[in-house]
Amino acid sequence: MKTPLSWLQLTHEKVRLLVAIAGICFADFLMFMQLGFRDALFDSAVILNEAIDGEIFLLSPQSDALIAMKSFSSRPLYAALGVEGVKSVTPIYLDFAIWKNPVNRKTRSILVLGFNPSKNIFNLPGINEENLAKIKLQDVVIFDELSRPEFGPIPELFQAGKTVKTEVGDRAVEVQGLFSLGTSFAADSNIFTSDLNFLRIFPQREKGIIDIGVIKLAPDADLEAVLNTLREKIAAGDVIVLSKEEYIEREKKYWQNGTAIGFIFALGTGMGFVVGTVIVYQILYTDVADHLPEYATLKAMGYTNNYLLGVVFQEAIILALIGFIPGFALSVFFYLNAASATGLPMIMTVSRAGTVLILTVGMCAISGSVAVGKLRAADPADIF
Amino acid sequence: MTNDYLLCKKIMKKNGIPVVEIRNLNHFFGEGNLRKQILFEINLTLKSGEVVIMKGPSGSGKTTLLTLMGGLRASQSGSMRVFGEELVGAKQQQLIKVRRNIGYIFQAHNLLECLTARQNVQMSIELQNGISPTEAKAKSLQMLAAVGLEDRVNYYPQKLSGGQKQRVAIARALVSHPRMVLADEPTAALDSKSGRDVVELMQKLAKEQGCTILIVTHDNRILDVADRIVELEDGRLREGSLVDSFIGR
Ligand SMILES: Nc1ncnc2c1ncn2[C@@H]1O[C@H](COP(=O)(O)OP(=O)(O)OP(=O)(O)O)[C@@H](O)[C@H]1O
Ligand SMILES: [Mg+2]
């Protein structure tokens, strides 16, 4: 091996190296935090989507997110029953209505979800046989106990044994049960009821014109195969067929690209990137500037400019890699603590670690390419 | 060194092809109104194996001429042939090729601070292709021993005295068996004893390798190592008096 000049140059000055590592570590930490919080928020945006117990979803192609749903005929959903591997199908009605706070009569928009209560298709605490039996009754709903307080002290009233009656849309309803879903970007509160009650609350909605079609597969069915068959057979212009993963991705994408939320966190990540770039640039620039006569000497000896560019870039890459490791470790530690402090699910994923590593290398590469400009000042004619 | 090169050197010696041949060289610094001529109609030939000392008052253009001969600066007009290669109008690539056959010794030693004495010397060998790391290391150690630094090979420049650093620089310049050594005031930073030692070492090693040496110096005490002395005054070259007249000083 030839003399590893970049490594020796970097490690020769320990203090400077430590400063560089600390800087990159800090920048990586910033990026990890921003991306972590963003993903945690987006994860919370898809709790409802994830709670639906199904492998395949039918949507209108114009439905981008829970708050932007376009209805479609349930005919293709029932047609799917004829496809091998499909065990059952369930239509879901979903819409927003005005909820009246039963205590102070103030109104708020609430997400109303209607489905056939003869079968439980949600993995949510509180959606159980008992509650499903209740919503079979006319004008009975169950209420999300994690709703924002502006919707009224419904859980408290209910637990105190009081009957909770209020209006949704223009319809008088009664809350006879509680479940836990939680607020998201889409809704500050949710009520679930039967499909029939849903159509009572929204008299303008038509029976059989649904918002989400849920398909449950037989245990031995091949997801890819069924997806392909469904896409061939029933996906026409008015419905798209998505796997659960794709369905959740679609919802996240809407919040990421269609709103400023993604941008704000991207901005935060960008700040981390810029801070890191500036720090690494400072380190590399001073390194080149301090060693200008030495670099000029190498040029005089017959080393090419490309060799020196290589040295500086190698230094950049080495910095990126050894700065990333403590940044990663620090972030894992903070994720664990932030998860317990904020209730947001913060976990280190391989893809996020990969993203930040790539950003770090990019950060150092940019710094390197700016710092090498100084190399041109290393003129071998000046060193005699 | 490769056999090719040795062969080439033999042929050159036999045929007397000069290592450096300068004809009517002029050099200017600056642009427009500030354009100032520094070197005037320089004619100089350095033969293989010669030790030449160049003297001259400060500002006379010695360093400038040295950097032109070494391909560190672009030659402008006239003719500057180094190892038979014309450097007037030469491309960067050609200049780099010429540089690889020259050992430079600077007034400031310009060693790389982050490398040990041995690694500094090795950087010079690594410019040649086809030399294994073990071989490169062995050659570096051998060269450092030749300059009397066998017990300092793993020292960083910071921990070496001025004379020791200059000797490392000499080892670095000579380890690749260059065809020519260019030295600009190599003794200026040294006391007279170590200055003398350093120059004698240079001369001895270079003679063993048969390479040409050009030393720029103000130091009258080292003039006797030269085969020939040339003098530069106000950018014009004058063939100097014979060495003997200086020894008798
Ligand atoms: N890069 C440059 N640009 C413009 N003028 C220069 C440059 N380098 C040198 N000169 C001028 O060229 C002249 C010769 O300089 P040079 O360095 O060759 O002198 P020198 O003989 O080596 O002097 P000294 O003995 O002091 O080292 C000086 O007048 C100097 O001002
Ligand atoms: Mg000079």
Image: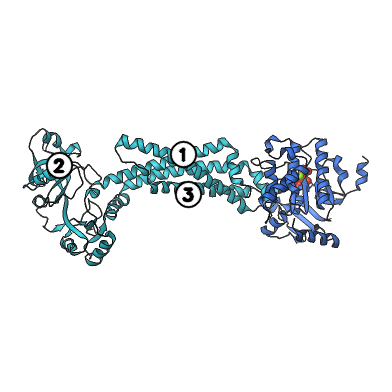
Chain colours: A cyan, B blue
Q: Quadrant of residue B69?
A: bottom right
Give residue A143's mark: 2
Counting other residues with Cα less than 10 Å from the Cα at mark 2, is it few (<14), some (14-19), or many (20 or more)? many
- Name the residue tied to disc 1: A326
Location of the C terminus of chain B by quadrant is top right
From the top left corner, tell me how far across and down residue B176 is, in percent.
73, 51
Q: In this view, does A228 lie above or below A275?
A: below
Q: In this view, does A300 lie above or below A332?
A: below
Give residue A105's mark: none
Give residue A362's mark: 3
From the top left corner, tell me how far across and down residue B213 is, in percent.
81, 50
Q: Is residue A57 above or below residue A45?
A: below
Give the residue at x 86% y 47%: B226
Location of the N terminus of chain B by quadrant is bottom right
Sequence-first disc among 3 and 2: 2
Whole-number angstrom distance, CA of label 3 to CA of label 2: 49 Å
Q: Which residue lies furthest to the front in this view?
A: A220
From the top left corner, tell me how far across and down residue A191 is, in percent.
15, 45
